[in-house]
Image (cartoon, rainbow, N blue to C red):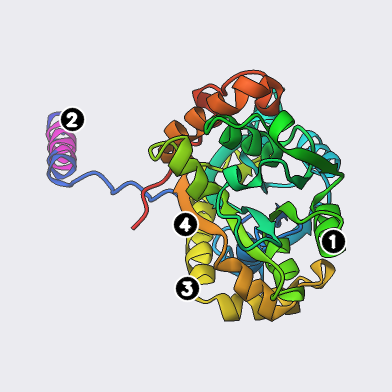
């Protein structure tokens, strides 16, 4: 009996082994989808750069990665520095040189894109003015001494044999609004003014004022056709960098927002007036202004050559404008494949 029982046991074990060998292993369970964040905070400057960010919020375009999305408008460089240093947001739109400076100061940000390539114009009351050379001996209102608009004016001048400190009478204003006021009041006949303020000023005195110099066109003419002028983009703060899935979705949706705005300036102006009341936008002027801004969404990895070339030229006059050095490769987010 013992022998028979042993044979039955061995047969049973053999059958179980054969069944196990013949059955495929269970399929691995798919990884669960990353959880949505309770809240994302998007931070934008007080200007047209805020419009594509507002579009994301108004149309709930980040619902796949966040339950709630908040838009905060920063008012001045000190405030945006505090936001970045304190980790009070997730994605922040800012000037490219400001982003480089924050990175070089160890604030741990990563640049995602460049979307704005020109906003600067010389607005003139003299219809004969077509280039900077036509402004020799003239008084020009210039905002933000030592900042990007001033540095670009100096570079554009020097590259065509003009000494801006000798050949122009530069009247430095505390900000673009003061530049515009000086021009409108007739204190100066020419002023360096960024969009959207440039359009607003021209609409107030359309018979008197015209666009004399567009900086990106002048840059291509006298500096380089190969080196562009990457002015502003969006960064990811350190508190969101552990979620590349969220960053990638933001890049996809932000690109679509920029494309929608450029294709639909009238609707974009209406949205800005309705949903950005703190900026006191009016739909008509905003729509007109959007056409005078050079928009092009380029991921940071693809804009790196332009950024480094542009920063290098700026650093010839003022190294501190980018924090004293070119940012290393850690500054540039690796990017995402877009359709």
Q: Closer to the camera, 54 or 140?
A: 140
Q: Which residues are magenta?
A: 5-17
Residue position marked by numbered label 1 in the rendering: 186
The quarter of the picture where the N terminus appears is top left
| Residue tagged 4 | 252
Nearer to us: label 2 or label 1: 1
Q: Is residue 269 left or right of residue 264?
A: right
Specify which label sits upstream in the sequence, 2 or 3.
2
Residue 185 visible in the snapshot: yes
The residue positioned 62% from the left and 63% from the top of the image is 127
Question: Mark 2: few, some, or many residues within 10 Å (few <14, many ≥20)?
Answer: few
Name the front one of labels 4 and 3.
3
Q: Nearer the viewer, mark 4 or mark 1?
A: 1
Work out whether mark 4 precedes mark 2 in sequence or the reverse, and give the earlier one: 2
Q: Earlier in the sequence, mark 4 or mark 3?
A: 4
* Relative height, residue 199 to residue 19 (above, below): below
Q: Is residue 19 above or below residue 266?
A: above
For residue 2, which numbered disc appears in the image?
2
In this rendered view, identify the residue nearer to me: 326 or 251.
Answer: 326
Left or right, residue 116 beside residue 252: right
Is 285 placed left or right of 215 in the picture?
A: right
**Disc 2 + disc 1, Cβ < 8 Å:** no
Task: Name the dominant secondary structure of the magenta segment.
Answer: helix
Marks 2 and 1 sit apart, C-alpha to C-alpha, by 117 Å
Dot label at residue 263 = 3
Residue 268: where, in percent of width, then height? 61, 75
**What secondary structure is found at the residue carrying circle 3?**
helix
């Amino acid at each position: 009996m013992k022998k028979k029982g042993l044979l039955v046991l061995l047969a049973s074990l053999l059958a179980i082994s054969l069944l196990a060998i013949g059955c495929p292993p269970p399929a691995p369970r798919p990884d669960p989808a990353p959880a949505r964040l309770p809240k994302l905070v998007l931070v934008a400057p007080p200007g047209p750069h805020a419009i594509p960010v507002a579009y994301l919020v108004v149309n709930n375009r980040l619902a796949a990665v966040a339950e709630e999305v908040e838009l905060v408008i920063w008012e001045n460089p000190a405030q945006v520095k505090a936001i970045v240093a304190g980790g009070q947001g997730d994605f922040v739109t800012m000037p490219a040189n400001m982003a480089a400076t924050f990175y070089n100061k160890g604030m741990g940000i990563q640049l995602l894109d460049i979307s704005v390539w020109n906003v600067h114009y010389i607005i003139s009351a003299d219809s004969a003015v077509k280039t900077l050379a036509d402004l020799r001996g003239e008084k020009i209102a210039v905002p933000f001494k030592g900042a990007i608009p001033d540095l670009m004016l100096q570079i554009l001048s020097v590259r065509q044999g003009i000494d801006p400190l000798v050949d122009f009478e530069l009247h430095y204003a505390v900000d673009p609004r003061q530049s515009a006021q000086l021009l409108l009041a007739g204190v100066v006949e020419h002023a360096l003014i960024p969009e959207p303020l440039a359009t607003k000023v021209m609409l107030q005195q359309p018979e008197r004022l015209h666009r004399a110099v567009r900086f990106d066109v002048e840059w291509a003419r006298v500096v380089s056709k190969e080196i562009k002028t990457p002015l502003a983009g969006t960064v990811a703060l350190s508190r969101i960098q552990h979620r590349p899935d969220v960053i990638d979705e933001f890049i996809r949706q932000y690109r679509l927002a920029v494309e929608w705005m450029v294709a639909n300036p009238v609707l974009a102006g209406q949205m800005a007036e309705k949903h950005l009341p703190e900026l006191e936008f009016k739909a008509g002027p905003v729509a007109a202004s959007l056409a005078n801004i050079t928009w092009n969404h380029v991921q940071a990895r693809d804009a790196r050559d332009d950024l480094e070339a542009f920063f290098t030229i700026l650093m010839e006059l003022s190294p501190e404008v980018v924090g004293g050095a070119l940012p290393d490769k850690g500054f540039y987010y690796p990017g995402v494949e877009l359709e």
